[in-house]
Image (spheres, rainbow, N blue to C red):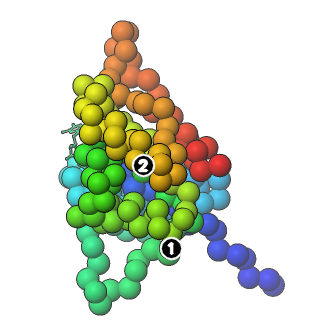
Amino acid sequence: MTPQAPKPFLYVVVCAAGIARDVSELITAAQQRDWEVGVIATPVATNGFLDTAAVEALTGRPVRSAWRTPADPRPFPTPDAVVVAPATFNTVNKWAAGIADTLALGTLSEAYGLGVPIAALPCVADALAAHPAYQESLIRLRGMGVRFGQPYTGEAGVGGERPDFGWERALDLLG
Ligand SMILES: Cc1cc2nc3c(=O)[nH]c(=O)nc-3n(C[C@H](O)[C@H](O)[C@H](O)COP(=O)(O)O)c2cc1C
């Protein structure tokens, strides 16, 4: 029997926005599109923003948040693509500035140099998005080839309903 080629590996970077509780929608959609998925969460995101146990059950892999020790092997294969969803104001600005003080930021920073497709779905309230630093970060990251989804504020509309985050947009952006 011919051995099967490994599936392409997708890193899903998850930041500490309220919508992160639904990230399993993205993981399931990616798996249906034949991606193998590994999740890297920011340290704040692991503090109640996502259901770590549910995500680990879905992916069959640990949710990574902390740096490995030098003696440990890399727990995930090299990515074929990287998605950051939801992307917070904080992480977008630090990423654009080249700060890598969390595993999530280090992973995002390195993805550019690896030359793999990167898609980002920000979840940032209008009041934060108005900050000039954020607008400059978006310009810088777009210039690096990062593909951004349309702005999503996370705020409820007139009827009190929150619009759908549209997790699959991240996969569509990868092309
Ligand atoms: C309940 C709750 C919801 C939040 N939602 C958002 C959000 O939608 N977008 C955002 O940029 N920050 C949001 N924040 C603030 C971030 O959690 C905070 O800026 C944090 O430092 C982000 O860390 P990270 O970028 O490392 O994940 C929220 C905070 C709380 C407590």
Residue at image coords 47%, 67%? 113
Q: Could you tell me how many numbered marks the image carries?
A: 2
Q: Is residue 6 above or below residue 145?
A: below
Residue at image coords 38%, 85%? 73
Nearer-the-camera pick, 103 or 165: 103
In front of the other: label 2 or label 1? 2
Residue at image coords 26%, 69%? 66
Q: Are marks 2 and 1 in contact (CB under 8 Å)?
A: no
Relative image position of residue 106 (x, y in whole percent): 33, 65
Horizontally, residue 5 falls left or right of residue 119, namely: right
Q: Amino acid at mark 1?
A: Thr
Label 2 neighbour load within 10 Å: few <14, some 14-19, many 20+: many
Does the beta carbon at disc 1 come under 8 Å from ligand 1? Answer: no
Q: Which residue is mark 2?
A: 141
Mark before the other along the chain sequence, 2 or 1: 1
Relative image position of residue 65 (x, y in whole percent): 29, 64
Label 1 neighbour load within 10 Å: few <14, some 14-19, many 20+: some
Q: Amino acid at mark 2?
A: Leu
Quarter holding residue 158: top left
The quarter of the image holding the N terminus is bottom right
Q: Is residue 28 visible?
A: no
Nearer-the-camera pick, 94 or 21: 94
Q: Is residue 117 above or below residue 120?
A: below
Relative image position of residue 27 (x, y in whole percent): 50, 52
Helix, strand or loop at label 2? It is: helix
Report the disc number at residue 78.
1
Q: Real-space Cα distance between discs 2 and 1?
A: 21 Å
Q: Is residue 12 visible?
A: yes
Q: Is residue 41 above or below residue 19?
A: below
- Image quadrant of ligand 1 equals top left
Horizontally, residue 118 falls left or right of residue 41, namely: right
